[in-house]
Image: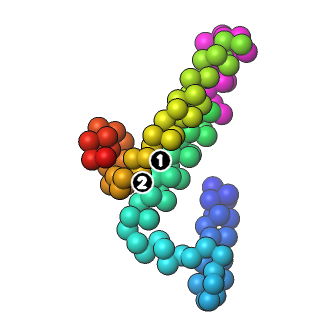
């Protein structure tokens, strides 16, 4: 819990320091724009979920499912392959102006139809 308090305190300090500058390190006024704010929240949630899964899944496979290191690696391999495969396609969809709300909500069908 103290880590969250320290993080909040540091963010507050960064906000106070950067808000008075003419050319801030990170332009916090961008967060006033709704679509950018939704994108940032969705990005943080996706990153947190993926990193948590990538850390926890090998332990699950090896300790709970009693898989070898090789089998654990083979079971984990499709994830980065699919990310590498779908990344360029997702970039093209984003260039077409797909609604960030549809995509961040996980509505893949809406993302493909609107592109």
Q: Is residue 43 visible?
A: yes
- Residue range in magenta is 55-69
Identify the image quadrant of residue 57.
top right
Q: Main structural element of the magenta stretch: helix, strand or loop?
A: helix
Q: Look at 57% across and 34% down and name the residue there.
A: 84
Q: Residue farthest to the right? A: 69
Nearer the observer, 63 or 15: 15
- Point out which mark residue 1 bears: none
Side (left or right) of 43 relative to 109:
right
Task: Give coordinates of residue 14: x percent, y percent.
Answer: 65, 76
**Which class describes the residues within 10 Å of circle 1: few (<14), some (14-19), or many (20+)?**
few
Residue 88 vs 77, above or below: the answer is below
Relative to 33, is 28 on the left or the right? right
Using the image as rendered, state which of residue 12 and residue 71 is in the foreground.
Answer: 71
Label 2 crowd (10 A; few <14 / some 14-19 / many >=20): few
Q: Which residue is mark 2?
A: 95
Image position of 41 (left or right of 98): right
What residue is at 54 percent from the left and 76 percent from the top? 28
Question: Label 1, on which residue?
Answer: 91
User: Decide: marks 1, 2 in contact (CB < 8 A)?
Assistant: yes
Quarter of the picture holding the N terminus: bottom right
Q: Secondary structure at mark 1?
A: helix
Determine whether 76 is above or below 41 in the image.
Answer: above
């Amino acid at each position: 819990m103290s880590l969250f308090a320290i993080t909040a305190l540091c963010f507050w300090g960064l906000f106070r320091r950067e808000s008075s500058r003419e050319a801030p390190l990170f332009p916090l006024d961008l967060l006033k724009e709704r679509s950018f704010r939704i994108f940032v929240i969705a990005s943080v949630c996706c990153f947190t979920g993926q990193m948590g899964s990538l850390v926890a899944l090998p332990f699950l496979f090896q300790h709970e499912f009693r898989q070898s290191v090789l089998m654990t690696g083979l079971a984990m391999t499709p994830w980065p392959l699919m990310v590498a495969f779908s990344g360029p396609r997702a970039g093209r969809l984003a260039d077409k102006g797909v609604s960030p709300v549809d995509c961040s909500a996980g509505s893949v069908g809406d993302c493909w139809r609107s592109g």
